[in-house]
Amino acid sequence: MPLFELECQSCHHTFEELVSSGAALPPCPACASEDVAKRLSAFAVGSAGAEAAPAVSPCGRCGDPRGPGACRFEA
């Protein structure tokens, strides 16, 4: 069952509800109105504790992104 974010069109109360596919949307828990619409909702995906790799800068002579000593032109 998907979790939907809903908004009452009468009182503008927003709420979340599990709704099985094909089922009618539930009434508003604040005012009991049946005039309820699905809202567009955003979700976030993250990874706790993960760190980004440090940026690599060019070595300066040839521009090799692997860094100093990575290319054959480095003396």
Image (cartoon, rainbow, N blue to C red):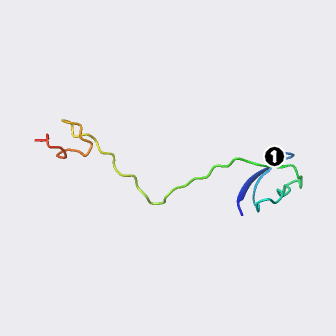
Residue 64 spot, x, y in % from top left: 24, 41
With respect to residue 22, does 55 lie above or below?
Answer: above
Q: Position of residue 71 (x, y in %)?
A: 18, 44
Q: Nearer the viewer, residue 51 or 36?
A: 36
Q: Nearer the viewer, residue 31 or 20?
A: 20
Q: Tell me the quadrant of the picture where the C terminus can be found.
A: top left
Residue with the most extreme left position? 75
Residue sitting at 52 percent across and 56 percent down?
A: 46
Circle 1 crowding by C-alpha within 10 Å: few under 14, some 14–19, many from 20 = some
Which residue is at 87% across, 46% downward?
A: 10
Q: Is residue 6 left or right of residue 33?
A: left
Q: Which residue is mark 1?
A: 12
- Type of amino acid under label 1: His
Residue 61 lies left or right of residue 48; in this view the side is: left
Query: Is residue 34 rendered to the left or right of residue 72?
Result: right
Which quadrant holds residue 45? Answer: bottom right
Residue at image point 77% right, 52% down: 6
Number of numbered tags placed on the structure image: 1
Query: Residue 14: x percent and y percent?
Result: 77, 51
Quadrant occupied by the N terminus? bottom right
Residue 18: image location, x then y, percent: 74, 62
* SS under mark 1: loop
